[in-house]
Image (cartoon, grey):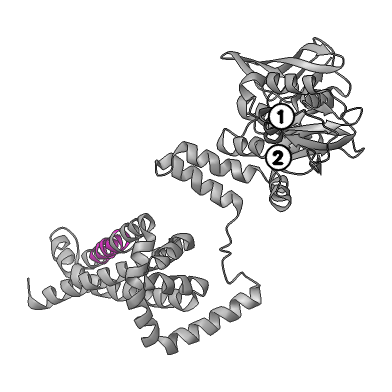
Amino acid sequence: MSLTASHSLLLLALLILLSAFFSLAEIALAASRPVKLRQMADEGNAEALRVIAIQENPGHYFTVVQIGMNALAILGGIVGEGLLSPPFERLLAAWLSAEQATTLAFVASFVLTTSLFIVVTDLIPKQVAMAVPEQLAIRVIGPMRLLTTLLKPLVLVYAWLVGGVIALLKLPKQRDDSITPEDILAMTQAGAQSGTLAASEQQVIENIFELETRTLPSAMTHRDSIVYFLIDDPDALIRSRIADEPYSAYPVCDGGIDHIVGYVTIKDLFQRVLGDQPISLADPGLLRKPLVVPDRLTLAEVLKQFRQAGETFALIVNEYSLVVGLISLNDVMSIVMGDMVSPWYEEQIVRRDENSWLIDGVTPIQDVRRALEIDSVPHEDEYETLAGFLMTMLRRVPKRTDSVTWGGYTFEVMDVDSYRIDQVMVTRTAAPGAGEAQG
């Protein structure tokens, strides 16, 4: 091989490597995650801050990349054709005419040079950059800033042209780096699938975001299950009820559950018991003012009210000022730390076999969807429970043996107590279909 051919080969290799550098720099910047870069910056990496700054205004950076890649590709084609065409032409001359050998030699050198650029300067750098974008971005940012300075006059010309075209066509100039809850959930799901985040940790994060959409009826103790005292209850009855049904707090009512006068804590009652003092709920020093919240609040909103009022217990009323339930801080936190279901989930949803479940009518519809793996149910914003779903679908109060088919499941009412749906049998059907109500 002659000296000239050796120089051409070295020059072609250099052009390919430089082009690979620009390709890697382009993808590394585009694929770098701002959250990861900020984390690296907080750990003291100054280059990460420079990458973030360029991501906010990447026009000049990408202009340098395109100038470099296109110039190198053109030079590579010229050098490759000059280097490879003569050997191919000499090889083909033994079988073809001079004109045909020249033409095919040019084609062969073009294909080989193009293939080298595609594989070495495009596919390999981009796959590597997609795998570790942040680490590569902070390594190439120094040389790229230097090139941007050296080519600034040319960069400004191209930037002016590009800016004019973008403005004329009203195209977007900057990407939106805001992170939505859906983005965070997607990242945590990816982390759980890759093994970097434990499944239980990912579930807790998902539960926290779901607090924004779940309303109080999905987690509260319902009206019929509230244990309360009347203000004139005798000492013996109060002590007996505490022993039978211990809770952290009890509403105190005047005549009925809808006339709340306050609440009393188990701590205060125990102090009276241990001090061998009589318990009288009429004692103003024993009663506390309850926190009352509307039933349309979300769990996130009630947490905020707990924090503002310094309370861990709230009564829930509807638009007619009737008490519909009770919720405590423990109820909300058990949902966050658990499987995003009510504390009594195991009692409300009982799996009989692979294709059937026995579900309590007051079970929150979100818990039913999760247990059955149903993506959505019709008119979900109109009700909170499985019983509400059945009433909405049937357009009347369900009776025993009434059924509804939706999403590949049949919901059959098994027991009704004074218009209250106690038990619903859910059976997976053979072929999921559209929802329809059956009486």
Residue at 55%, 46% in the rendered image: 185
Residue 357 visible here: yes
Is 110 included in the stretch rendered in magenta? yes
Residue type at mark 1 is: Pro
Is 42 included in the stretch rendered in magenta? no
Could you say where residue 229 lies in the image, as x and y percent from the top left? 81, 27
Q: Main secondary structure of the magenta part?
A: helix
> Which quadrant of the figure has residue 66?
bottom left
Residue at 90%, 38% in the rendered image: 321
The crowding category of the residue bearing disc 1, from other C-alpha atoms within 10 Å (few below 14, some 14 to 19, many at least 20), is: many
Residue 23 visible here: no
Check disc 1 and report its element: helix, strand or loop.
Answer: loop
**Horizontal arrangement in the rendering, residue 183 relative to residue 408 (left or right):** left
**Horizontal arrangement in the rendering, residue 295 relative to residue 156 (left or right):** right
**Horizontal arrangement in the rendering, residue 93 relative to residue 163 (left or right):** left
Instruction: Determine which residue is flagged by label 2.
Output: 214
Q: Is residue 188 above or below residue 344?
A: below
Could you say where residue 363 lies in the image, as x and y percent from the top left? 71, 25
The crowding category of the residue bearing disc 2, from other C-alpha atoms within 10 Å (few below 14, some 14 to 19, many at least 20), is: many
210 and 168: which is toward the camera: 210
Instruction: Determine which residue is flagged by label 1.
Output: 364
Q: Give yes or no for contact between labels 1 and 2 (Cβ–Cβ under 8 Å).
A: yes
Residue that protrudes farthest toward the front in the picture: 276
- Quick one: quadrant of the C terminus? top right
Residue type at mark 2 is: Arg
Could you say where residue 176 lies in the image, as x and y percent from the top left? 58, 64
| Magenta span of residues | 104-119
Going from N to C along the chain, the mark reached first, 1 or 2, is 2
**Horizontal arrangement in the rendering, residue 175 relative to residue 425 (left or right):** left
